[in-house]
Image (tube, rainbow, N blue to C red):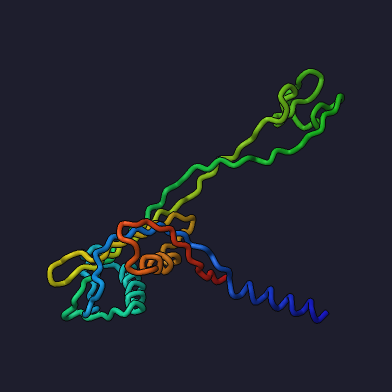
């Protein structure tokens, strides 16, 4: 009884704590990052008014957290670097074909295949899921599913001469509807191993806790 109670408590804790989801991203980086950089102060580039949404500001906060982890600090007045953030989400509906589960009707000389169907054929009732010459007839269901294509671009440039020092593009395709739910993992992927390989493409997988 005691072991059963312990197992039940563990199961409840797992349900309350949620489960980890793997978020896979394709990350491409290009950079001319100096070996030594004395001033790591930065400011965000002001986006166009129509793009300056609360959602973008939220994602800038995620970038701000990653930069702080790497030793950068924000200085809006006189920064040495400037950081730009852009993102897109495109809903791509996709037709997916699944095999349908056809019911099995045994053949009867008197009633045909299960006696369920109205079409008469050669002394028995006709089963549309079974061809008497070729066997079972394949059945398919066509469903529409949504794939969300997301892209995050982050660039760092010198504030003095606009020289690009770091460009990263993160691409992700998933069935998850909510962009804010996956964006923390995408931004973290952008700065994994900073500055990363120059001109290199990587696949980064991160575990993200999903609360249930």
In the image, what residue occupies the spot 55% across and 68% down? 20
Residue 7: image location, x then y, percent: 74, 75
Residue 155 in picture, x, y percent from top left: 26, 65
Is residue 61 shown above or below 206?
below
User: Furthest-front residue in view?
Assistant: 35
Residue 2: where, in percent of width, then height? Answer: 80, 81
Residue displayed at 34% across by 77% down: 70
Residue that protrudes farthest toward the top in the picture: 122
68 left or right of 82? right
Q: Quadrant of the N terminus?
A: bottom right
* Displayed quadrant of residue 151: bottom left
Quarter of the picture containing the C terminus is bottom right
Return the residue found at the far right.
110
Position of 67 with respect to 19 (left or right) is left
* Circle count: 0
Position of 175 with respect to 116 (left or right) is left
Occupied quadrant, residue 98 = top right
Q: Is residue 171 above or below residue 34?
A: above
């Amino acid at each position: 009884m005691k072991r059963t109670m312990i197992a039940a408590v563990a199961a409840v804790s797992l349900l309350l704590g949620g489960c980890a989801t793997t978020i896979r991203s394709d990350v491409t980086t290009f950079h001319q990052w100096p070996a030594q950089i004395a001033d790591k102060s930065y400011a965000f580039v002001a986006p166009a008014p129509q793009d300056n949404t609360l959602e973008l500001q939220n994602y800038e906060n995620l970038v701000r957290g990653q930069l702080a982890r790497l030793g950068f600090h924000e200085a809006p007045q006189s920064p040495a670097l400037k950081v730009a953030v852009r993102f897109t989400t495109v809903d791509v509906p996709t037709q997916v074909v699944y095999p349908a589960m056809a019911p099995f009707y045994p053949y009867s000389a008197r009633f045909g295949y299960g006696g369920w169907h109205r079409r008469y054929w050669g002394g028995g009732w006709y089963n549309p899921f079974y061809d008497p010459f070729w066997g079972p007839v394949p059945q398919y269901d066509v469903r529409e599913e949504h794939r969300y294509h997301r892209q995050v671009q982050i660039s760092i440039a010198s504030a003095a001469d606009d020289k690009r020092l770091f460009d990263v593009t993160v691409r992700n395709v998933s069935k998850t509807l909510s962009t804010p739910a996956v964006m923390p993992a995408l931004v973290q992927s952008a700065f994994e191993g900073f500055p990363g390989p120059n001109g290199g493409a990587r696949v980064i997988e991160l575990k993200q806790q999903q609360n249930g």
